[in-house]
Amino acid sequence: MGSPSGRRPSRRVPGTLTDVRGGYGAPTPAADAQHVFALFGSAVLACLDRDGKIIWRKDLPRHDFDVAIRHPSPILFEETVIVQADQNGKKSSMIAFDKKSGDIKWDEPRPELIFAHSTPIRATVNGQPQLICSHSNALEGVDPQTGKQLWSIESSGETASPAFGNDLVYVDTGRGGGGTCVDLAVMPPRLKWKSPGNQIGEGLGSPIIVDNVLYRLHRGDFLLARARRHGANLVQRAPAAGQRLGQPDRHG
């Protein structure tokens, strides 16, 4: 096991949240060659160098979360750090911070979108970069240069990140229920298929698409593989007695 090379305290905004499931440090940091960018459940974004020195620290301009920000990990795009700040009270927004200074480069309000606990994914759609974001009431594509919405379709997917492959994007809530697959080869996007609401159990990890197969792990004890194009079940696998399955990745 490795050991920490250094620890640095980060002042926390005095919080009044009573629900801190996941803790204040749950979002996964993002990193480039020089810096690490960490988002904390107290609505604080910080940039540290590789020696652990705090370069800058910023409070999110608005925060009205029902739980500690445990959902979105920061996303790096060119010279910005992007945070999907979905929340209550019609205060949702997408915010881009300058990587060097921490100053806000753009702040795009999204009052129609409700809470989300998932991290957007980066994708190239029809030759253009996009962020694909899932929310409690919609799946959408966002221009990472401006924060403007490019497309949206009704969906439920606030816990697990979407999966993207070969122009198709899939999402489910992660809490159990049906899933939605959308074809992005045409604009506006069209619904490809939906799975019945009773087919998918709780699975708080995220799905992945490898080649023509969609993989989804449920509760660590059931792996489901579906045909990407039409959603038919290909494999349903339960582990041997006493075993648990880890979150799948492209390497198995």
Image (tube, rainbow, N blue to C red):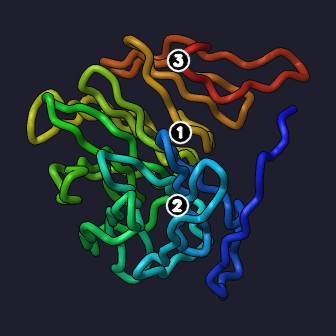
Check the picture and name the quadrant holding the C terminus.
Answer: top right
Q: How many neighbours does mark 1 have within 10 angstroms: few (below 14), some (14-19), or many (20 or more)? A: few
Residue under pointer 1? 198
Q: Which residue is mark 2?
A: 47
In front: 215, or 60? 60
Give x and y (percent) for residue 54: 59, 65
Residues at discs 1 and 2 in contact (Cβ within 8 Å): no
Quarter of the image where one finds residue 69 = bottom right
Q: Is residue 1 toward the left or the right of residue 246 in the image?
A: right
| Mark 2 neighbour density, 10 Å: few (under 14) some (14–19) many (20 or more) | many
Q: Where is 4 relative to 252, above or below? A: below
Q: Give whichever of discs 1 and 2 has the lower sequence position.
A: 2
Position of 232 relative to 176 (above/below):
above
Q: Position of residue 212 (x, y in %)?
A: 37, 12
Identify the residue position indicated by label 3 in the image: 250
Label 1 or label 2, whichever lies nearer to me, is 2
Q: Quadrant of the N terminus?
A: top right
Q: Secondary structure at mark 3?
A: loop
At which x and y percent is residue 204? 61, 44
Q: Earlier in the sequence, mark 3 or mark 2?
A: 2
Task: Give the CA separation, mark 3 to mark 1.
Answer: 27 Å
Residue at horizontal 45%, vertical 76%?
60
Tag 3: amino acid: Arg
Q: Secondary structure at mark 1?
A: loop
Residue at horizontal 9 percent and vertical 38 percent from the top: 187
Cα gap from disc 1 to disc 2, whole angstroms: 43 Å
Amino acid on which disc 2 is placed: Cys
Q: First in sequence: mark 3 or mark 1?
A: 1
